[in-house]
Amino acid sequence: MPPLLVGMTGASGVIYGVRLLEVLKESKIESHLVMTNAAKETLVLETTRKVSELESLASVSYAINDIAAPPASGSFRSRGMVVVPCSMKTLAGIANGYSANLLLRAAEVTLKERRPLIIVPRETPLTRIQLENMIRVMDAGAVILPAMPGFYTRPKTMENLVDFLVGKILDVLEIEHTLYSRWGGPDVSPGSAHPAYASSD
């Protein structure tokens, strides 16, 4: 299979990108990483990881300004791209076709070649400009997958919350995983009412 491109920006939530790379490596799925300079700074601020350690999780790592790297060309085959986390600056660049670095160019190529592009924005609250940029990239073919973990799995740790989101990314890419338990309906005994619907009397 072609590799999966992973772009990481300086938005908070770098742990999502770290975990995605870990899972891809564990699953023996080739990953190609592009980090912005701000992403490297955020990695140091939010985790105990070193940049070199993160890059070692990926099969291949590219410099952000290496605009001649393979992912800059549509002739380079990939199974898609995930930008996780995605800053509002990078979102704006993708939405407006402003390919000022390799990450932005790779995202543009992913869209023009009609391959899956998953954007994981990490910002709150959102301005109208940011929302409109999300609509623009969605209309161009991208999937907007906000960093919003679900709680129906009754997570007990932060790792559970991170795995839920990474699992959602893999779902869009149709990559099998066991990172979270899928909803199968309320777990109640036959003939009894679910607590959520029980009378308060």
Image: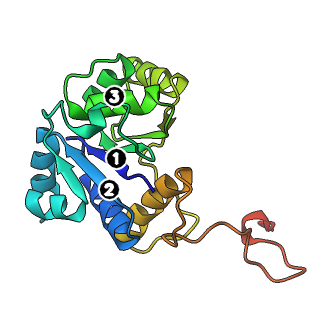
| Residue 184 appearing in the image | yes
- Report the amino acid beneath label 3: Leu
In the image: residue 84, left or right of residue 114: left
Give how far across and how far down residue 143 sits, in percent.
51, 37
Of 32 and 83, nearer the camera is: 32
Q: Secondary structure at mark 2?
A: strand
Give how far across and how far down residue 109 sits, in percent.
37, 29
The residue labelled by disc 1 is 5
The residue labelled by disc 3 is 91
Quarter of the image where one finds residue 83 = top left
Quarter of the image where one finds residue 199 = bottom right
Q: Give the CA separation, mark 3 to mark 2.
A: 21 Å
| Residue 50 appearing in the image | no
Q: Give the CA separation, mark 3 to mark 1.
A: 16 Å
Give how far across and how far down residue 100 sits, in percent.
20, 22
Earlier-in-chain disc, 3 versus 1: 1
Instruction: Name above or below for residue 166 compared with residue 125.
Output: below
Q: Secondary structure at mark 3?
A: helix
Q: Which of the labelled discs sits on residue 31, or is there none?
A: 2
Give how far across and how far down residue 131 sits, in percent.
44, 24
Earlier-in-chain disc, 2 versus 1: 1
In the image: residue 182, left or right of residue 160: right
- Report the amino acid beneath label 1: Leu
CB atoms at circles 2 and 1 under 8 Å apart?
A: yes
Q: Residue at x 48, y 61 (%)?
A: 167
